[in-house]
Image (cartoon, rainbow, N blue to C red):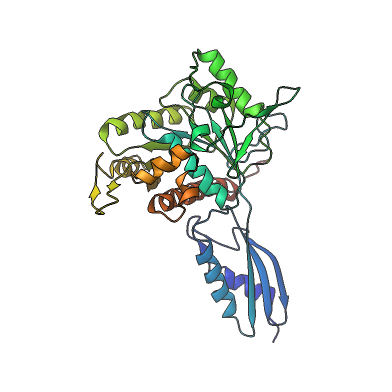
Amino acid sequence: MAVTQEEVLNALRTVQDPDLKRDLVSLGFIKQLRIEGGRVAFAIELTTPACPVRDLMKDQARVAVAAIPDVLQVDITMTSQVRSSMAAQPSGGLVPTVKNIIPIASGKGGVGKSTVSANLALALSRTGARVGLMDADVYGPTIPTLLGITAAPEVDAQNRITPVESHGLKVISMGFFMKPEEAVVWRGPMLHKTVQQFLGGVLWGELDYLLVDLPPGTGDVQLSLCQSIPVTGAVIVSTPQDVALNVAQKAIAMFKKLNAPILGVIENMSHYVCPHCGTTDEIFGTGGAQRTAERMDLPFLGAIPLATPVRVASDDGIPIVISQPDSPAAQAFVQAAERLAAQVSIRAMQGELQPHVNVSF
């Protein structure tokens, strides 16, 4: 008896995306379904290449279809198409080719926000996503050092900037345009102009994610970014200690006032593991950011350890995700990036799956 398309789709309706809480068929993830005798082939198109459960869903789909009588072979191709939850930008908008803009913020300085930004961007890029990193920390740009970039970007006759490419990322930073010993002493209007230039004056090309490393606090750069372009949502970075958490909550409040969603909270320097004896020391406490996220009903994206290899890799310009991808610290960044990508997908799909009601008079 011939296998039918309806049998295959009914089998696949038993497989759910654990983040979106819907089956693969109703989500529209099943593509290119072909049936040739006892051979069934199809693609599962996920919403991000960084999906942490892609292998699980592939295995579940294979088992479900293989259970159909007369199915002899199941071939599954995994693909992805990153969605955007941002309001549609007009063709003349600042960054019409960027699907998701994600500010990385903190209340206080010194919590490792730039290190987190660089490693998150690299972790997303290593999955196959198209990723850009905008260093908007104008007063203290560190992204060039973290990524080992010494080349300057090209500027064409129309004053458009070609971002520098490093480790698969497209990167722009104020650090490219100043000497290491120079200081930026600007008021609000100049900061606003720089944000506008880094968004609309840079030839970003097609990007799935543009991560924006913000300066600490709740100042002009944050306001300019959120008022210039719709953002997908912000990530808040904090250490576990109360001093940092109290100020991180102010950053969360600022984004809420600007109607910018919070995609999640990351706890950096969560604990220290001695490389000699393996003893764990909670130098800044531990779990504070997770408890804050739970209390404020925000996703907790992960805890990053305080580790000497992270510092060494950052100073060397080859972040830990690249230099030691199998290390515990690198894996913590990868897991945080996967959870971040999942939150972006959830927001995007919630918009697509909302019922549309047409009212006529």
Give the left or right position of residue 73, taking residue 342 as reference.
right
Q: Position of residue 292 (x, y in %)?
A: 31, 40
Position of 220 relative to 337 (above/below): above
Residue pictured at 58% horizontal, 79% vertical = 66
255 vs 246, nearest the viewer: 246
- Is residue 132 shown to the viewer in this render? yes
Give the left or right position of residue 343, taking residue 230 as reference.
left
101 vs 353, nearest the viewer: 101
- Is residue 265 shown to the viewer in this render? no
Tell me the quarter of the image containing the N terminus: bottom right
Q: Quadrant of residue 134?
A: top right
Q: Position of residue 314 (x, y in %)?
A: 44, 39
Give the left or right position of residue 25, taking residue 110 as reference.
right
Residue pictured at 54% horizontal, 76% vertical = 63
Position of 230 relative to 74 (above/below): above
Q: Position of residue 111 (x, y in %)?
A: 36, 34
Tell me the quarter of the image containing the C terminus: top right
159 vs 102, nearest the viewer: 159
- Which residue of the protein is positioned furthest toward the bottom in this rendering? 1
